[in-house]
Amino acid sequence: MDVKEHVRRVEGITRWLGKKLGKLRPELAVIMGSGLSGCVPPLEDSVSISYADIPGFPQSTVQGHAGTLLAGKTKEGLGVAMMQGRFHYYEGHAIGDLAIPVRALYGLGVKKLIVTAAVGSVKRSVKPGDLVVLNDHINFMCRNPLRGIYDSRFGKMFTDMTEPYDPVFRRETLKLCKKLGIRATEGVYLAETGPSYETAAEIRAFAMLGADVVGMSTVPEVLVARQLGMRVLGLCWVTNLATGISSARLSHQEVVAQGKLVAVKFQKLLQAVLSLPQVRD
């Protein structure tokens, strides 16, 4: 897809969503990871839109991703757009297409992004059920959604990534986790393409590179958001110990099942995060 076609597609989606949402203008977006689509906090005046109904919008094909955009307001009046399901490079989407949802939501007024994901732990000390608040990442996909589709309306070509994850959001979220009794730590996310899980040798290498958790998403969305100047919070639930850390065989069904187990805790945390003054301002 050339730059002009990409821009037309993004702007078309933004216009369509703008008409569908009426006066509602989200200021913050949340992208829900595998098994977490049902963890939506209460929203007032909510509107639910199937991805399939949005002209030009990518489609999610993975179990555990509902494929619905839910928009509404928190009780404090914050406009929120919840993407119940995301798009992955391994599904066959062009890497540039992963930029489309974030850019379209930015066009509606979204300036803050929360990305969530189910991840495997590279460290024995970070266990299934733990929350990892991202403080950095490693793009081992070796693909960048910003490549080849630059337009000044989307920000600078050369995007600074000194602090991809907002330090204030991280600090306040960790405080909330302690208050809610959620075991949490900060960590580094390593993104690889998937869809196959990692080998034990790869996990040993990733640990040497400084990774704490591993997954197949999230980083492309963060790169796009940071180019747009969005403030980003990354929240990852550990669903399993990675290959070689545990002798258990891995499956996507396990990932989805673990997501359901943490659903109540995650919903409470997300609701608390959306109520933070630092997030609303």
Image (tube, rainbow, N blue to C red):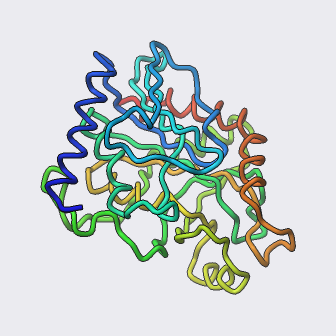
Give 132 or 33, whichever is nearer the viewer.
Answer: 33
- Image coordinates of residue 78 in percent, x first then y, are 40, 23
- Image coordinates of residue 167 in percent, x first then y, are 44, 52
- Image coordinates of residue 171 in percent, x first then y, are 52, 47
Give 130 or 248, whichever is nearer the viewer.
Answer: 248
In the picture, measured across the screen, residue 266 lies left or right of residue 228, that is right
Quadrant where the image shows the C terminus: top left
Residue drawn at 48 percent across, 72 percent down: 138
Residue 244 occupies which quadrant of the picture? bottom right
Residue drawn at 43 percent across, 55 percent down: 165
In the picture, measured across the screen, residue 174 lies left or right of residue 254, that is left
Tell me if residue 43 comes above or below residue 167 in the rendering: above
- Image coordinates of residue 6 in percent, x first then y, are 22, 53
Tell me if residue 208 comes above or below residue 41 in the rendering: below
Residue drawn at 28 percent across, 16 percent down: 23
Toward the right, the furthest residue is 247
